[in-house]
Image (tube, coloured by chain):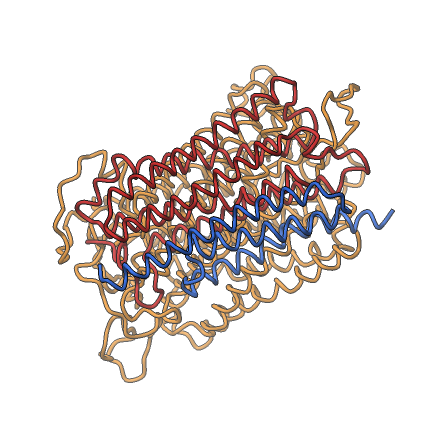
Chain colours: A blue, B red, C orange
């Protein structure tokens, strides 16, 4: 293990700690925000934005996705597209059906 | 004949086999939890106005917040255990992996309290649709936590022998196990606000 | 008999070879070739069983409420008659077994496992232990499915589609169906992971993506479909199990009344939720059923026309596009659920678009025959028959994919005719082509050509005899899943006579498989011995590995690839085929 490899690992370790603290703060934040009264739509948006931010940190830093290969990015892109279709279409279909009445 | 690229990365793809394998597996897990999240959205948006029960009615937010912190902490210790292996520090690896397992146990104990209390007061999956999806989502997530702990336990225990003879291969295995563990944490990061706070 | 070559490859890293015991060599093997054979044999047994269930169904359809010969002795309670409850079990299990226990394990588990590593010049699959686990998970799922026939109330009987609310309240067999599916899905998801990593990572040096045999491309796309679509059904199965075992109401609407009594459940669920999740899997699933067939037919046609496939590149783009589109057409199975016009338009559009890549593939295969030097071997007969049969199957799908015509055709025999044309004289014929084609690679012997022809011609005739009249009956409005074949409906009377005709065709089709079964086993021991490449093929499994391939590692030495997969009849070459790993033209 070369000195530069060890150095890069130590840098990463610092990043892990920073991310950990950020995630803690975000967790407290999301719980705190949930106690404010706001319209449902807005509450959902805020919660999802915070969760997405937290999730991105976990993925990018802990899972090393920020330095991953294109191949992995392509697999994930494909997955995200189908995930969105699966999330959106059944509910959109229900909405469309209700518009009939 | 040996199977190529089990340890060293294939030049044109830049990954070793198990890393690609675990990301593909995680892709399928995204679709699995995605299907359940989609079910949650459909059931909630389809419920007649005023009939949907909200998490706050039944669920213990402070306890779940604690669990969120525990799981995120375990993600940190997991990646630190891998980093220790990269730095050839086997002792540190054992400590961090041990902490990860401990955190997992903690998570499950809190979960146990949560479930136990609900069953005591007669809040069951069949009570209403919200509780049904709550128990299903958190239950499936919990099963995934247990699965991850079994794998991590193996790498802390009998599996750790491999570090002596093939350190790089063992480090790769821990990295792959880590990716799975972070994913379990990721799912919880979305589950927590969705079920408990919204 | 040589199904596994005893010679061991002397690779440079062959430090830890040791003799494996019987159980590790033949039962709990990690060798993709052994696992492929295990999948193949198990799947063929399930196909035979599923076929037998159909033969029973066809008795009930042709001669309702009449005691069935032979099998009738087992149905003492009803005096040998197939009652509707039993018919429904036969129907649900026929579909389930054929699709999940028969075709996919054969097309992907057997053919994919055995051939893909060989065609890409790999010593095995990327994860041999996982491969073994996939097979045994499938096996366990199959055992659970079969055992369900002995559950109180019988096997699953709510269609292979298991629609709630009916499936939620069905007898125990349905719960066993769900458990069986859990194991089958795990098997497929792990298997598909293995295939993808193998194809991406273990291609031999020089084997670029556009030099891959089309069969490998087909398996590659298939694996993506399995990986990303099956989890939705896994989720749905979990939800239905919660409904059945934990009393939840994921799929039970409020106020449901069963047999005059209000169901004591929380309600608030959605039967449509099941349909969305089920079809999210089941539509890509039908492409899982056809893609390996495309792959096999392409290999057999290239080999037996002695020329490169026409439009290889287009075929590759087509199946990739097809795979992607297959995820966004699913609700064309749900046009009759009260869907709004926006969704209906969306799904009709995507469904029409998805027909294009199939046409591209079919056209390319047909044009490949032009100017060819065709060898009418038995694999080629089945491959050629596939083309018009798949065309009929595909064309009959179009009125189903358009909502206005689907109003008349949904849930009729037209649908059954459509999908059986694609799967039976379509995929299954391709499977036969593959078996006759690759049998010499597995065994070092050829199957009898004469018996093969005796198998082919009657099969081709009778299979059309079963499924073509279904299209007629469907257009007349005869519904599916009727134990008496429509006899109690006045609008069905003019076309009822087809029932006996179809049933007799089905039983004769069954008889026509006997030469195949005999041929298969007889040839393992007594078939004409052949060398490594009896078909004079260009792809690596034929040209670079012995027949059968070497037990550990397949190849004496991993080949380096220098050319595309179908360099047949190269101008100036001495022979009419130039193997992929050959540097110079001979």
The residue at the far bottom in this view is C572
In the depicted structure, whether residue B98 falls above or below residue C553 = above
Quadrant, the N terminus of chain C: top left
Along the line of sight, the residue nearer the viewer: B151 or B190: B190
Quadrant, the C terminus of chain C: bottom left
Q: How many marks?
A: 0
The residue at the far top in this view is C77
Residue C446 seen from this side: no
Give me the residue at 54% from left, 38% from top: C96
Please provide percent x and percent y for residue A60: 47, 57
Name which quarter of the figure residue C310 lies in.
bottom left
The residue at the far right in this view is A101
Along the line of sight, the residue nearer the viewer: B149 or C535: B149
In the depicted structure, whether residue C10 falls above or below residue C583 = above
Along the line of sight, the residue nearer the viewer: C144 or C573: C144
Q: Is residue C568 left or right of residue B41?
A: left
Residue B60 seen from this side: yes
Please provide percent x and percent y for residue C261: 78, 19
In the depicted structure, whether residue B132 falls above or below residue A54 = above
Please provide percent x and percent y for residue A38: 76, 46
Name which quarter of the figure residue C138 lies in.
top left
Please provide percent x and percent y for residue C468: 62, 51
Along the line of sight, the residue nearer the viewer: C450 or B40: B40
Name which quarter of the figure residue C345 lies in.
bottom right
């Amino acid at each position: 293990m070369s000195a530069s490899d060890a150095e890069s690992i130590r840098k990463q370790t610092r990043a892990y700690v920073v991310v950990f603290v950020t995630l803690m703060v975000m967790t407290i934040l999301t719980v705190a925000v949930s106690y404010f009264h706001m319209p449902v739509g807005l509450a959902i948006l805020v919660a999802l934005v915070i969760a997405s931010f937290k999730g991105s940190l976990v993925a990018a830093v802990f899972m090393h996705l920020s330095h991953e290969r294109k191949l992995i990015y392509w697999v994930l892109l494909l997955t995200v597209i189908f995930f969105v279709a699966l999330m959106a279409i059944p509910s959109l279909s229900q909405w469309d059906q209700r518009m009939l009445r | 004949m040996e199977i190529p690229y089990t340890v060293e990365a294939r030049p044109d793809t830049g990954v070793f086999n198990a890393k690609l394998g675990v990301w593909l597996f995680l892709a399928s897990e995204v679709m699995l939890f995605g299907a359940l999240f989609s079910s949650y959205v459909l059931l909630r948006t389809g419920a007649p106005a005023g009939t949907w029960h909200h998490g706050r009615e039944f669920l213990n937010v402070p306890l779940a917040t604690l669990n969120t912190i525990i799981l995120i902490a375990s993600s940190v210790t997991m990646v630190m255990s891998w980093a220790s292996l990269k730095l050839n520090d086997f002792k540190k690896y054992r400590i961090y992996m041990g902490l990860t397992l401990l955190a997992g146990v903690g998570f499950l104990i809190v979960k146990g309290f949560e479930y136990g209390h609900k069953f005591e007061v007669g809040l069951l999956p069949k009570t209403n649709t919200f509780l049904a999806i709550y128990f299903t989502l958190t239950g499936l997530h919990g099963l995934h936590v247990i699965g991850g702990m079994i794998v991590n336990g193996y790498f802390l225990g009998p599996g750790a022998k491999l570090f002596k003879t093939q350190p790089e291969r063992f480090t790769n295995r821990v990295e792959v196990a880590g990716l799975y563990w972070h994913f379990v944490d990721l799912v919880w990061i979305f589950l927590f606000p969705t079920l408990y706070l919204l | 008999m040589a199904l596994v070559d005893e010679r061991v490859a002397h690779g440079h890293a062959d430090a830890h070879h040791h003799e494996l015991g019987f159980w590790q060599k033949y039962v709990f093997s990690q060798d993709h070739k052994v696992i492929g054979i295990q999948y193949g044999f198990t799947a063929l047994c399930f196909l035979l069983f599923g076929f037998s269930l159909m033969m029973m169904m066809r008795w009930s359809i042709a001669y309702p409420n009449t005691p069935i010969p032979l099998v009738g002795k087992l149905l003492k309670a009803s005096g040998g008659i197939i009652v509707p409850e039993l018919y429904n079990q036969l129907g649900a299990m026929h579909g389930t077994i054929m699709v999940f226990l028969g075709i996919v394990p054969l097309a992907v588990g057997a053919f994919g496992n055995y051939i893909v590593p060989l065609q890409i010049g790999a010593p095995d699959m990327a994860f041999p232990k996982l491969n073994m686990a996939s097979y045994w998970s499938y096996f366990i799922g199959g055992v659970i499915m079969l055992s369900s026939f002995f559950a109180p109330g019988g096997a699953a009987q709510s269609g292979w589609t298991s629609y709630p609310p009916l499936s939620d309240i069905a007898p125990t067999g349905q719960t066993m169906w769900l458990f069986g599916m859990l194991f089958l899905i795990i098997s497929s998801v792990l298997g598909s992971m293995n295939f993808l990593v193998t194809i991406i990572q273990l291609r031999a040096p020089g084997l670029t993506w556009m030099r891959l045999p089309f069969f490998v491309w087909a398996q590659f796309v298939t694996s993506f479909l399995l990986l990303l679509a099956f989890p939705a059904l896994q989720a749905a199965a979990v939800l239905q199990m919660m409904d059945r075992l934990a009393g939840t109401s994921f799929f039970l609407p409020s106020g449901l009344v069963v047999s005059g009594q209000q169901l004591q459940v929380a309600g608030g669920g959605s039967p449509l939720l099941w349909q969305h999740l089920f079809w999210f899997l089941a539509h890509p699933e039908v492409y899982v059923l056809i893609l390996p067939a495309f792959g096999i037919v392409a290999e057999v046609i290239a080999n037996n026309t002695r020329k490169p496939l026409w439009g290889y590149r287009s075929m590759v783009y087509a199946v990739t596009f097809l795979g992607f589109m297959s995820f966004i057409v699913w609700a064309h199975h749900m046009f009759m659920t009260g869907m709004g016009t926006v969704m209906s338009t969306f799904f009709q559009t995507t469904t029409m678009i998805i027909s294009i890549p199939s046409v591209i593939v079919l056209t390319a295969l047909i044009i490949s025959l032009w100017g060819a030097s065709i060898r009418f071997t038995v694999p080629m007969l089945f491959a050629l028959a596939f083309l018009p049969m798949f065309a009929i199957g595909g064309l009959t799908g179009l009125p189903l994919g358009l909502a206005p015509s689907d109003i008349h055709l949904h849930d009729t025999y037209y649908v059954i005719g459509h999908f059986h044309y694609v799967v039976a004289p379509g995929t299954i014929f391709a499977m036969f082509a593959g078996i006759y084609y690759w049998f010499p690679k597995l065994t070092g012997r050829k199957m009898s050509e004469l018996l093969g022809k005796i198998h082919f011609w009657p099969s081709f005739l009778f299979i059309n005899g079963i499924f073509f009249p279904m299209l007629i009956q469907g257009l007349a409005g005869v519904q599916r899943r009727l134990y008496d074949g429509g006899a109690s409906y006045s609008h069905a009377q003019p076309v009822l006579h087809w029932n006996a005709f179809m049933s007799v065709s089905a039983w004769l089709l069954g008889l026509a498989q006997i030469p195949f079964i005999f041929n298969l086993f007889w040839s393992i021991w007594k078939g004409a011995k052949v060398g490594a490449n009896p078909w004079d093929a260009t792809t690596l499994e034929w040209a670079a590995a012995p027949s059968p391939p070497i037990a550990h590692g397949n190849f004496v030495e991993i080949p380096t690839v220098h050319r595309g997969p179908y360099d047949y009849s190269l101008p100036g070459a001495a022979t009419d085929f130039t193997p992929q790993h050959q540097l110079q033209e001979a």
